[in-house]
Image (tube, rainbow, N blue to C red):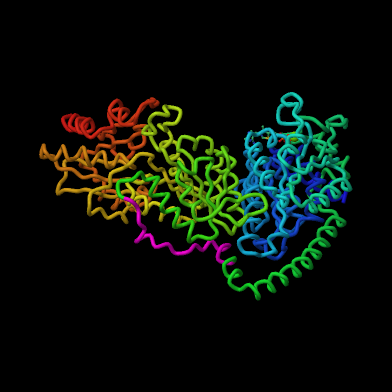
Amino acid sequence: MNLAADNIRILSAAMVENANSGHPGGAMGGADFINVLYSEYLVYDPENPLWAQRDRFFLDPGHMSPMLYTTLMLSGKFSLDDLKSFRQWGSSCPGHPELNKMRGIENTSGPLGQGHAYAVGAAIAAKFLAAHLQNPAFEKERIYTYISDGGIQEEVSQGAGRVAGFLGLNNLIMFYDSNDIQLSTECAAVSTENTAMKYRAWNWNVITVNGNDITDIRKALDAAQKEATRPTLIIGKCVMGKGCRDDENKNYEHNCKTHGAPLGGKAFYNTIKNLGGNPDNPFVVYDGVKQLYADRKKELLTITAKRHEEEAEWARTHSKQAQKEQEWFEGKLPEIDWQNMQVKNGEPTRNASGTILEVLGKQVENMVCASADLCNSDKTDGFLKQTREIIRGDFGGNFFQAGVSEMTMSCCMIGMMLHGGVTTAMGTFFVFSDYMKPAIRMAALMEIPVKFIWTHDSFRVGEDGPTHEPIEHEAQIRLMEKVKNHNGRNSMLVLRPADVRETIVCWKMAYQNILTPTALILSRQKVQNLPEGVNYENATKGGYIVVDSLNPDIILLASGSEVSTLVNAAQLLQKDGIKYRIASIPSEGLFRSQSLDYQKQILPDNIKKFGLTAGLTVNLEGLVGSDGKVFGVNSFGYSAPFSVLDEKLGITAENVYQKILDYLKK
Ligand SMILES: Cc1ncc(C[n+]2csc(CCOP(=O)(O)OP(=O)(O)O)c2C)c(N)n1
Ligand SMILES: [Mg+2]
């Protein structure tokens, strides 16, 4: 076992040296734990990486990727050549691990703190599936995660720790690589907290061990596996850069310098020698280590053969649930009768979403909906009405009360989907999407189709004032529509529907989008329905005509509630004999993905265009063209009733009409 850990250390250091960039120190300290985990504890099927009830390992400090790649290489998922291409163009070993379940990488990691929070979500998913499918196989599943000083310090760990303890996630086992060193300083320079006491206060089982001692690690893992009611934190006191020697062959352990740079020349040579390797040919796997992992593979094949037998037996006696399980893991969702969805006309679009969520709550058994303590405001309580809350000891509900922790909620929902078998949506106020952005970005990068339900979408929040009034948020989030994911798609779908009927179509798109995250941006205030005759189905093109005339003099365009403001302003134009077209653009990103022909059909070049937005004018500047005009709100909002704000900020039919006339006169 010690030979294997040293082998992981040698290979990790060699990968970084070979790439001439990377992080050797942390990986070398963590080698003992990851070796014990993969060679003795983690239960996975060497022949089926997607086995639903496999144990999962979520790495938080992605910079320690060399130890993960190396261990996965020993487990047969990577080759030595892969390790040699670490951090190079096209390599399967990018600098920080990127989601690749077929190769045993359960999550993308790098932004510290998020990785272990996904693990909390995955542990919830495992318990949810055990309860909802009544399948005991999910009770055998363990979620392991690995956190470091950086993750412990990141704020999201506060939410993840609280949630895991509160829900009593005893299927969650977290190893904390407590090496007292971080990137630029020793940990003592920034913290004196008692981490063990902190986690104990959150209802965790906390065990402190020598993180480089195999016997200690085994004992802790054994105890963690037996824990019946709490998540376990194993605080492993690890030695940063274990085995490292410097240029002069002096001890180079416990040193920040090994955090993020190759050991370099002489130091590398001395270190590899010290660890028993050959500095001139470090990319070698020792025979004994090969044997260790070959033996483990055999063992795993026996373990999983037995497990698969039990599962097959269960499936025979529970054919309906087995069928469900398969569909849930394939991501198949029940057909929803969107055509006949009933919503109340003239209501806020958040209310329409609430009504839709009632239907989803009734019909989508494997859906988990969450809210960050705003369910009665963001209307996710429509969903809650149909189910009950997930609580400690009862995972038979479908609603996750995340508490006031938007980023934790986001990570948990992403983690549930990384686990598989569930689909997720979550609500909060649009302005607080700021607290979620790091997780939104990761969902977009990993292509996880979570749904974000953001209500209170403009200054029309009103009396609560500028702290609660999103101004720049639509522009911010629409940037994600412009970023392509690695499959060439818009990395996110962002929809802001114009009225309750368009909300149905947008929710349908969100529901059916299983390739990227989707955002629904919804109004707090009532929105009048668009005129009769609108073909709402065209919203699936991202932008479409809602009112038209022959040879229009001007095209008016907007998203969300401003479309109906345009409809009212246009009625005044009519009196002046001005002919207009009104386009609703719920998603510029989706609209720009249509054929150029279609785009020109809706927004031809030779007609003047006027955009209206309750946010930054940049929201629509790309749509109106260089001679177009956008009227919007380019300052923070104010505290006042929203009808007063409408007047003061000029988002009224009368004022917009005047602005259109001014523009036409130019
Ligand atoms: C959210 C976030 N902030 C900052 C960083 C940059 N960063 C990478 S590792 C690290 C700290 C490393 O300390 P630790 O987690 O203890 O890892 P070790 O030095 O022990 O390898 C920092 C600040 C990051 N990756 N993510
Ligand atoms: Mg550290």
Residue 434 lies in magenta, yes or no? no
Instruction: Choose between 304 and 226: the one closer to the eye.
Output: 226
Q: Quadrant of ligand 2?
A: top right
Between residue 167 and residue 543, name the one nearer to us.
167
Find residue 94 and report its horizontal and vertical position in percent.
64, 46
Q: Is residue 333 visible?
A: yes
Residue 28 is situated, as x and y percent measured from the top left of the image, at 79, 41
Left or right of residue 470: residue 555: left
Q: Residue at x 45, y 41 (%)?
A: 377
**Which range of residues does the magenta coloring cover?**
326-344
Task: From this view, report whether residue 209 is shown above or below residue 246.
Answer: below
Residue 401 shown left or right of residue 148 in the figure? left
At x 84%, y 58%, the residue is 292
Number of numbered markers: 0
Residue furthest out toward the top: 189
In the image, residue 440 above or below residue 36: above
In the rendered image, residue 434, in percent from the top left (x then y), is placed at 50, 35
**Residue 598 x %, y %:** 29, 52
Name the quadrant containing residue 26: top right
In the foreground, 88 or 280:
88
Q: Quadrant of residue 312?
A: bottom right
Would you identify the image quadrant in which residue 648 lies? top left
Q: Is residue 512 visible?
A: no
Instruction: Identify the image quadrant of the C terminus.
Output: top left
